[in-house]
Image (cartoon, rainbow, N blue to C red):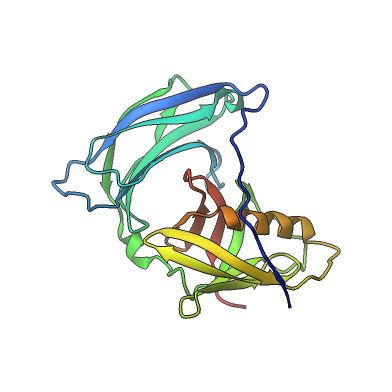
Amino acid sequence: MRGMNWAPVFLWPVLLAGAQPAAVTGTALYRERIAMPPGAVFEATLEEVGKTGAQPVVLGRMRKEDAGQPPYAFSISYDKGKVRRRRTYVVKARVLVDGSPRFESELVRVLTRGKGREAGTLLMRAATAQAAANAPLAGTHWTLATLAGKKVTLEPGQKEPHLVFNAGEKRAGGFTGCNRMSASYETSGNGLTFGYGMGTLMACARGMELEDAFRKVLPDVKSYRIEGGRLELLDGAGKVLAGFEAKPAP
């Protein structure tokens, strides 16, 4: 194995030509007389939804760390040039404590089908018992499912990229599409950062493009969240960089 230093890559925000910035606004609250602890996170997301079972497409997300108590006002920025009038768009809101949902709202339609950019007041309810069944970060075989908002598609017979976190050694190891890798990591609450990484240096006929994209997102990871059997790695703005599914180890 040859060592490799994966230095963080700093990306400055760039406004793409033709982008049409807009925002969906609203307020979220819950009625229970429960105070949120320090460090609770409020999150509101704008998504395009399609057929039942299909992965929603995230158009924008607002995330507020150490959110305090409700009500929570939100403004979700998005590019209205990506909105299609025949498609359906929804807003959802939730409060997370230690990375797990504590309160969450139902989906509220916006933008199309007679709806506008004002979502109104979203009523959040106590999250279901699913949070108690969340797979742990460490020790779970996390198979890569989405990358940069796109579903990961493999060719027949191609091995699935994955990560396994070892809490004792504070290292994450796995397969990135062509080569095996290992990197140090640190966690604090739902914060997550990757450190020094190393991996094999084989050249493969397939999987190299996916591997390059997979490895490039790791230095940008700042936090994570787990819902049931799904793990999402987030950047500093709360954008989902990669999504994983918990699967039995092969």
Residue 71 image point, x, y percent? 23, 35
Is residue 197 visible in the rendered image? The answer is yes
Is residue 141 visible in the rendered image? The answer is no
Apparent side of residue 10 relative to residue 73 in the rendered image (left or right): right
Residue 74 image point, x, y percent? 35, 32
* In the rendered image, the vertical position of residue 15 relative to residue 150, given as above or below: above
Apparent side of residue 215 relative to residue 117 in the rendered image (left or right): right
Residue at 73% in and 78% down? 1
Residue at 47% in and 60% down? 192
Apparent side of residue 194 relative to residue 115 in the rendered image (left or right): right
Residue 99 image point, x, y percent? 37, 57
Q: How many marks?
A: 0
Foreground residue, 171 or 205? 171
Foreground residue, 187 or 234? 187
Residue 102 image point, x, y percent? 29, 53
Residue at 47% in and 73% down? 138
* In the rendered image, the vertical position of residue 113 relative to residue 209, given as above or below: above
* In the rendered image, the vertical position of residue 134 relative to residue 22, given as above or below: below
Residue sitting farthest toward the right = 205
Foreground residue, 35 or 12? 12
- Quadrant of the image occupied by residue 106: top left
* In the rendered image, the vertical position of residue 142 relative to residue 62, given as above or below: below
